[in-house]
Amino acid sequence: MAKADLEVIVACLRRARRAVLGVTLSTIAITLFFGASVYYREGASEAVVALGTAVLVGAVLSLLFLLKKARVESSRIYRLLNKEPEQIAWVYDVATRKRLRRQEHRELRTVRFHLKNGRYCHLRGVQADEIAQVMDAIKACAPEARIGYSEELDQQYRDNPDLMLDD
């Protein structure tokens, strides 16, 4: 497997991790602003200050956890494709729509990895124009995995995920 095969998947993983990190940092900033405005206002109740402190501590702990897991190489999908591709039984993509502003819609895809042990994991936020490259990279990394969705494959996987082989 070439490192170039994983580049598009690494880009998707980084994009998803940056989005979560951005939400966490925004939560910390809002909590700090809220806490400072309530703290310096006269008559602020202890319950409100305690709630703000609890949210801030939770957000900081989440940030530390995310920073620890920020390396793409530590993600489950990257490890599967790079070190254990034989564990991947079946891969397919699902369309999701995100609403931007009021009327724009952007189509994003989620790639679902079903493993031979019966578990699954997701690669979320794949842009529609990247899906062919992502699926080609998965096929190059895990040639034994079945690619695409059908009712027949779904039933085969439910019956015995270990026996799913690409014909």
Image (cartoon, grey):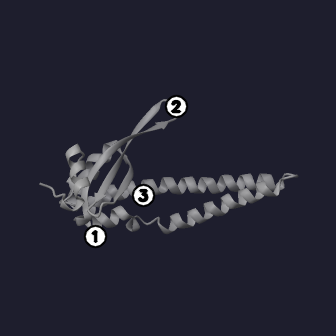
Chain-order first, disc 1 or disc 3? 3
Residue 32: percent from the left, percent from the top?
70, 56
For the question of whether residue 35 can be seen, the reply is: yes
The label nearer to you, 2 versus 3, is: 2
Q: How far apart are labels 2 and 1 at the CA level?
A: 43 Å
Can you tell which quarter of the image residue 36 is in? Answer: bottom right
Chain-order first, disc 2 or disc 1? 1
* Residue neighbourhood size for the residue with mark 2, other residues' Cα within 10 Å, grouped as few (<14), some (14–19), many (≥20): few
For the question of whether residue 137 can be seen, the reply is: no
Disc 1 marks which amino acid?
Answer: Lys
Pointers 1 and 3 in contact (C-beta within 8 Å): no
Vertical side of 55 occupied by 94: above or below: above
**Residue 112 got which mark?**
none
The residue pinned by badge 1 equals 83
Residue 35: percent from the left, percent from the top?
75, 55
The residue pinned by badge 2 equals 102
Q: Helix or strand or loop: what does disc 1 sit on?
A: helix
Disc 3 marks which amino acid?
Answer: Arg
Vertical side of 57 occupied by 41: above or below: above
* Residue neighbourhood size for the residue with mark 1, other residues' Cα within 10 Å, grouped as few (<14), some (14–19), many (≥20): few
In percent of the image, x 33 and y 67: which residue is there?
Answer: 79
Q: Helix or strand or loop: what does disc 2 sit on?
A: loop
Can you tell which quarter of the image residue 94 is in? Answer: top left
In percent of the image, x 42 and y 57: which residue is there?
Answer: 14
**Residue 14 got which mark?**
3
